[in-house]
Amino acid sequence: MKMKNFTYIIIYLFIIIGTMSCDQDAILEEKAKDFLSPENSFVDKSGFESGLADIYRKIRQYFYANTDSYENFDMQGIDVDFAAESWSPEFVPYFNWNTINADSDFADKWWSRLYALIYRANVIIDRAGASGVTWSSDEEKNAIIGEAKFLRAWCYHFLGNMWGGVPLVLNETTSAKFDYTRATQEEVYKQCKEDLDFATKWMITVDKQKGGRPPRAAAYQLLTEVDICLKDYDGAVQAASQVINDPNFYLMTQRFGTNKNFKFQGYDYQGPAEPWGDVYWDLFQEGNMNWLEGNHEAIWNMEMDFNILGGGNNKDGGYFVLERWWNPWPWHLVDKDGVPNQLKDTCCGAGTNVLIPTEYAGNQIWQYKDDWNKDIRNSQYNIQRVYYWVNHASKYYGQVITKESMGDPSVYYRSISPAFKKAASAVHHGMFKFDGQNYDGGGIYKDWYIMRLPEVYLLRAEAYLGKNDMLHAAADINAVRNRAQATPVIPGDVNIDLILDERARELYMEEFRLSTLMRLGKLAEYVMKYNNVAIRDGWKLDNHVNKLPIPNYDIEANTKAKLEQNPGY
């Protein structure tokens, strides 16, 4: 049976890991000698690093690679304002914001996952300070604790953003508990701040950190957001400046990395290959996405290493298939004569026509200040908008795909909607053959950003907006826009919607858009303005959907105290 209540998840993990703080009768005592247990694992730095590695493995699984499905990316703007499901001829709602209730599988999924991660972080925090652990120094111990506290704060900031006040569980849970009560949202954020204040003192800096682990800068970035939530705008500015002023980090402005000399024939695959890409395109190439690989705006990455044990796709059951699920499928079309198109193995994108950009993300935001042809994030390298017939057997070979040349014109837009190329590889790996064709099934096989420097600039701009300092807010927005060769904004342009638009332009597919909009109380507004189904069906959403419901299962199981439900549910 599925473990839904976070109380029972804690108990379940407790049993799996092995009665970590057992205080039973001596007859039940067991000394593990020939197998791993918490008692013989959490005894030195390497044991605790293994515990942290398990958390990162879970983060990769929970947030990015749980199954071969578009549901992997439901926090990143699906069915909000970034992307719509087009699996069928009519847009289908994924969230059903107009009927969401306390039995929602989505709310239950993230509530349970976040508390499961918090449980793991609490185990590390509590046990790192226990007697009998060998540390080379207090600095070594505190670096581990600081990293675990960062991870705990990272989880609680999602809970605070998406639910408001939630139960604060700050110690390892070793027995059943049925009397949870909700802290206030402010108390949740204050706990995040307390954890992050510790983390920013002790976490390792990026130049000493391994790939895939967050450095101290990640704690400062998260602290910036938390301080904004607490309306401590001066604190947010100070925290963001710790990252922005760190010489280890700067926006990449020149071509760099593995494919800076890449040449391509163009999407029609005709004529000689020509230089391809720009600096924004470089940011999303395999081998370029980590600070250790020379990318100085990469702060924290989800790591993917194909065919390495623990590395991700296919070797150990991970499915990072953003390219597969969040791209159109022009390669799958059939022309008017019944000749099928085919997939080339370079710069194509093995989409399955499930998620396509909304009008807001695919068109509207790029018209700002007449920058359609200026903003490099909207260049042909970064968003493909024109598609060609590429099968030599077709009489339309090399021509632009049009409704008139398609066998089924009804799937025109869904099949050739804008494709954000950050989710595609420059050269497909050819690891698998699908339907006899040499492509890899839409797996990305590259790292992905969890935190990237432009978001810090945009968070600091948000803090300056809170201070009513539009001059400095505009300057931070322009730091991001200048790299994109977009027209600068002026102080009079600045408001929260401009910042959200800039986040969309810069961080599409990267940021956890759902959490951002809920944090700002903008979810209902943005769904009604930009969600395809909401527009089509005329939804009138109440503001209660700016927060998720606490799962009913948890409320009912919490028999010794009242766990208050969010209003409207």
Image (tube, rainbow, N blue to C red):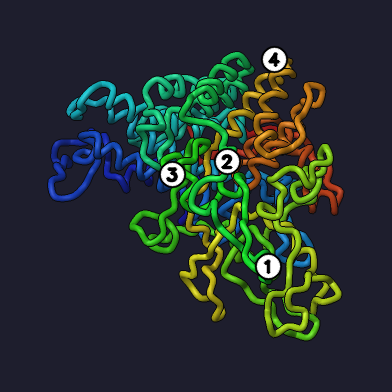
Number of the front mark, 3 or 2 = 2
Mark 4, residue position: 467
At x 33%, y 34%, the residue is 123
Disc 1 to disc 3, C-alpha distance: 32 Å
The x, y position of residue 455, in whole percent, is 60, 33
The type of residue carrying mark 4 is Lys
At x 72%, y 24%, the residue is 474
Q: Dot 2 surroundings within 10 Å: few (below 14), some, or many (20 or more)?
A: few
Q: Is residue 243 above or below residue 352?
A: above
Disc 4 to disc 3, C-alpha distance: 37 Å
Q: Earlier in the sequence, mark 4 or mark 3?
A: 3
The type of residue carrying mark 3 is Glu
Helix, strand, or loop for circle 1? loop
Number of the front mark, 4 or 2 = 2
Mark 1, residue position: 329
The x, y position of residue 45, in whole percent, is 24, 34
The type of residue carrying mark 1 is Trp
Mark 2, residue position: 254
The image quarter in which residue 198 lies: top left
Disc 4 to disc 2, C-alpha distance: 33 Å
Q: Earlier in the sequence, mark 3 or mark 2?
A: 2
Q: Earlier in the sequence, mark 4 or mark 2?
A: 2
Foreground residue among 568 and 296: 296
Q: Earlier in the sequence, mark 1 or mark 3?
A: 3
Q: Residue 348: in sight, yes or no?
A: no
Helix, strand, or loop for circle 3? helix
The type of residue carrying mark 2 is Gln
Mark 3, residue position: 293
Name the quarter where the C terminus is drawn.
Answer: top right
Decide if residue 520 is on the left or right side of residue 432: right
